Image: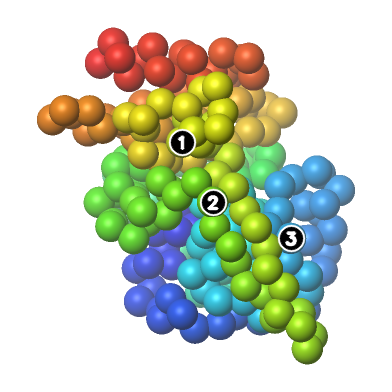
Amino acid sequence: MTALLFLESGKDMNGEVTVPTDLTQEFKDIQNANGTTMGLRIGETVRRIDLLYGLLLRSGNDAAIALAEFIGGDVSTFVEMMNDKAKEMGAEMTHFVNPHGMQNEEHYSCLNDIAIFASALTKNPLLAKMVSTVNYTAHVQRGSSEINIEMSNTNQLLNPETASYNKYFTGLKTGTTNSAGYCLASRYQKSDRDLIILTFDGDADTYYADTVKLAEYA
């Protein structure tokens, strides 16, 4: 949803965002909870498209906060935009309280609604390309130095160097919290079929294999 709202905003992809200085506590919360990050630091400058890649490939919770602040003016306003958009899309069992999905009892969704969001994402050529990308280098201006941040997609189905690789998968997104377990929204394209496959609350050792079984069955 964070990525969809950014695209809907019409903002220039190559414009820059300064990582906001007033989000220090939010970043600390992410780090304390061992949440995944893109590796941003307060006050540095990064291109918007690099933030999107950090969000979608690396599950960068810091990138999500930076995008939310940029689009909504502040995180709470952006979360309101997320919930309004979910209702507009017919996602009736979803409620957002943050832009990154870290654990919160009031932040929830369901298989049907995630399928709605995933389908919408696949219809945008740029986002579809991003979630199928295996590796990407983001460029961050850190003081007087330009820093390269190397990122790999967290979805092992896409990476030829992993045992889970399957050439018919072209996305989409991993997600893990203690409460939700291992979750994966996948896109499977073979012959004339273009499918969304959802595996939620999966076992760490089998959820990729379970996703492949579901895709092959369908």
- In the image, what residue type sits under mark 2? Asn
Residue beneath label 2, please?
135
Specify the quadrant of the image occupied by residue 9. Answer: bottom left
Query: In x, y percent, where is residue 54?
Result: 58, 58
Q: Residue at x 16, y 28 (%)?
A: 191
User: The disc labelled 3 sits on which kind of residue?
Assistant: Gly
| Residue at numbered disc 1 | 158
Quick one: 74 or 118, which is closer to the camera?
Answer: 118
What residue lies at 68% left-to-right and 39% top-to-bottom?
103
Give the Cα distance between marks 2 and 1.
10 Å
Q: Residues within 10 Å of mark 2 (few under 14, many from 20)?
A: some
Q: Are marks 3 and 1 in contact (CB under 8 Å)?
A: no
Is residue 105 at all visible to an observer of this figure? yes
On residue 39, the disc is 3
Q: Is residue 98 left or right of residue 15?
A: right
In front here: 162 or 211? 162
Among the 4 quarters of the image, the one containing residue 113: top left
Mark 1 residue element: helix
Q: Are marks 2 and 3 in contact (CB under 8 Å)?
A: no
Q: Is residue 21 above or below residue 194?
A: below
